[in-house]
Amino acid sequence: MLEAALRLVTQTGAQSMSFQDLADAVRIRKASVHYHFRTKSDLLFELVNGYVVTLKRESNHILDEPWSGDNKLRMLLDGFTQSVDARHGRRVSLSAMLSAEVVNLEPKVADRLASFFQNQAGALTTILAEGRQDGSLRFGGPAEPLAWMILSLVEGAMLVARVTGGGELFVEMQRALERLLVVPFSERTPTGSRPVATTGPVEDVAPVAPTAAGAEMQKSVVGLPTSRQAHSSL
């Protein structure tokens, strides 16, 4: 049932999906859906919670690999690519779809969605720092604001691809982003060995307290007060 709900939400949006739609998709009575989920918010919370857990596990796997920063960045971005329906350009990630509807989400759902962005920004921050350390990535300024900017670009690009029907265009936008950051092999000059501490698992929130710039970026991406603790309702 959750798989069917995820497919419906990422195609039509949470507000458009009804319990009757879900019942029809899995060929059961509407009352049976209500038996498992009293409200749509209960259903959305389970969807988002599973999404957060799955993506955090995948991010941790990437961070634990002995790859260079550019390869870790590419692997993380490829996960977003898999969320877009390249055939029709109509399906986007759960995070992108729900972010567009955040004003209509119950606080418990919005808070859990915020934790997804914090987790991903934390992973990106670590990868960017490692990449600059090993000479595979090049950028100016601190890593955290750039991580939030990349996350914002990728999530927004999904919505653009959905409108234009260009799943392939989304892939090209991702590759263009990589070209801006990745240092060609012939130009790489490692600045030092990679710190072991940066390769550890990502916690359920960002691994370090956000800087002022990072907090502002978080507020603009998620649309929630930056002081709210995303996991407080769990």
Image (cartoon, rainbow, N blue to C red):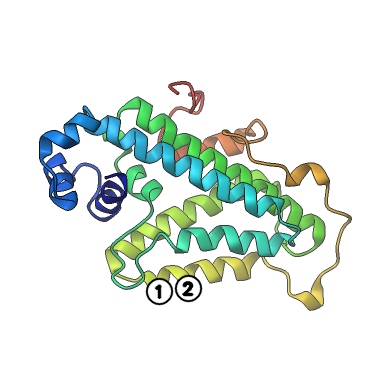
Q: Indicate the quadrant containing the C terminus: top left, top right, bottom left or bottom right.
A: top left
Badge number at residue 13 = none
**Of the residues shown, which amino acid type is indicated by label 1?**
Glu
Label 1 secondary element: helix
Q: Could you tell me residue 88's position as x and y percent?
A: 28, 70
Q: Quadrant of residue 32?
A: top left
Question: Taking 60 as reference, is 94 left or right?
Answer: left
> Mark 1 sits on what residue?
168
Identify the residue shown where x is 74% and y is 62%: 68
Question: Taking 47 as reference, is 77 left or right?
Answer: right
Q: Could you tell me residue 198's position as x and y percent?
A: 75, 44
Q: Residue extending furthest bottom?
A: 186
Cβ atoms under marks 1 and 2 closer than 8 Å: yes
- 228 shown above or below 207: above
Q: Could you tell me residue 56's position as x and y percent?
A: 55, 44
Identify the residue shown where x is 29% and y is 41%: 101
Q: Nearer the viewer, residue 79 or 138?
A: 79
Identify the residue shown where x is 37% and y is 26%: 108
> Mark 2 sits on what residue?
172
**Of the residues shown, which amino acid type is indicated by label 2?**
Glu
Can residue 105 be seen in the rendering of this structure? no
Q: Residues within 10 Å of mark 2 (few under 14, many from 20)?
A: few
Q: Could you tell me residue 208's position as x and y percent?
A: 67, 33
Label 2 secondary element: helix
Tell me how far mark 1 sits from mark 2, CA to CA. 6 Å
